[in-house]
Image (cartoon, rainbow, N blue to C red):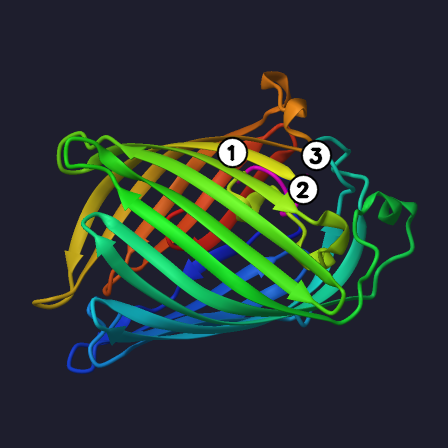
Amino acid sequence: MKISARIFISVILVLFSMPSLAWRVIPLVSYSPSSGVMFGGVVSQNMKLPFNPFAFNCMAHVFTNGSMMVKPEFFFPLNNGFINIKAEYRVDNDNSFYGWGNDGDEDVNTSYDRQMQELSGIYKFSPAHGMALSIGIRVNHSTVFDRSEDTLWTASPCSDYGSLWSAGPLIEAHWLFPSLITGYTSIEMEHQMGSGFSYSNAAASLAFFAPIGSSTTPAFRIHGERHFGLSETPFPHLPGLGRNTGLRGYHDRRFGGSWTLLANLELRQRLVTFKIDESSTIELGVVLFGDAGQVADDLDEVRWNRFHLDGGLGLRVIIPGGGTFRLDFAVSPEGPGMQMAFGELF
């Protein structure tokens, strides 16, 4: 069976809690054909609103090939909202670049390593019933190194792969639909400025949920993005469509373009609930899903026959504190694949 180079085959080994301190710890182990064995875990404390006096969450892992990620974040209540302070440090080795555009051959690619850091401070509050507004600032740093020599790099819209810093504001508005319709719409915008360069990204999503009884929920989302300033965007921050952005049957960053259009359809089924103590439970569920997505450099290039399709089956584990572990098995014309992540896709 063909397995993508950046696929996680992950197993939850231990799940335990200390109710008096509201701590949750999830050790994880997984394997990637390109990166080797991964060891890591998630530690969280008090991850339920109103986060009083504070909440903490940290995910970290390291691969035997040197790839690693550490992502701590704090939550502090403030008035009718909360402040989220988040940092992330990651090293990704043995990445693949497939060229640029909506096509290309999956077997034609070149490799590179990257290092990325991020620091952000965001205030999230509710200015009106059913609405959440997030306003903040983010600082990014990235470096691309050990690029293999290949003419495929000429297809990249980026020309600078060195150490680049940028910072800028971000805003997200999220509206819940009235009670007669379960769903939401959201708009996100971010602008980054560095020394002699700047770039921006705008995204919008529309999602619907139609519960059938108490344990079955069909769900649907349409998501669109527009990226501005391709030639000034550091390579690791170029827009990409693939496994980690919702097209689960394809390699990460498999397709690249200024415009992104993505649709996701899921049938979510809760199977069983286990009670840990008086206030903690674990829920297990499965998801049938299908994805369709495409990218384009101009809006008039979007066509019905340019969508890439996949489908598959997923496992969901809702852990104490409200977090969700998901493991998705997807099949596309380019073969099978798997992905591990925390949180629902939408």
Camera-side residue: 285 or 114? 114
Instruction: Kindly indicate the quadrant of the structure image that contains residue 38.
Output: bottom right
Residue 162 in picture, x, y percent from top left: 80, 68
User: What number is the disc on residue 254?
Assistant: 2
User: Residue placed at 38% from the left, 35% from the top?
Assistant: 206
Q: Residue at x 19, y 69 (%)?
A: 50
Residue 243, percent across and down?
Answer: 56, 44
Mark 1, residue position: 262
Label 1 amino acid?
Leu
- Answer whether labels 2 and 1 touch (C-beta < 8 Å): no
Quadrant of the rendered structure where residue 66 is?
Answer: bottom right
**Contact check, label 3 and label 2, Cβ < 8 Å:** no
Q: Position of residue 189 (x, y in %)?
A: 50, 51
Residue depth check, mark 3 versus mark 1: number of the one nearer the observer: 3
First-in-chain label (3 vs 1): 1
Crowding near the residue tagged with mark 2, few <14, some 14–19, many ≥20 C-alpha atoms within 10 Å:
many
As for residue 41 lying within the magenta part, the answer is no
Q: Which region shows up in magenta?
A: 248-257
Relative to 17, does residue 299 appear above or below in the rendering?
A: above
Q: Nearer the viewer, residue 3 or 220?
A: 220
User: How many marks on residues?
Assistant: 3
Q: Nearer the viewer, mark 3 or mark 2?
A: 3
Circle 3 residue = 297
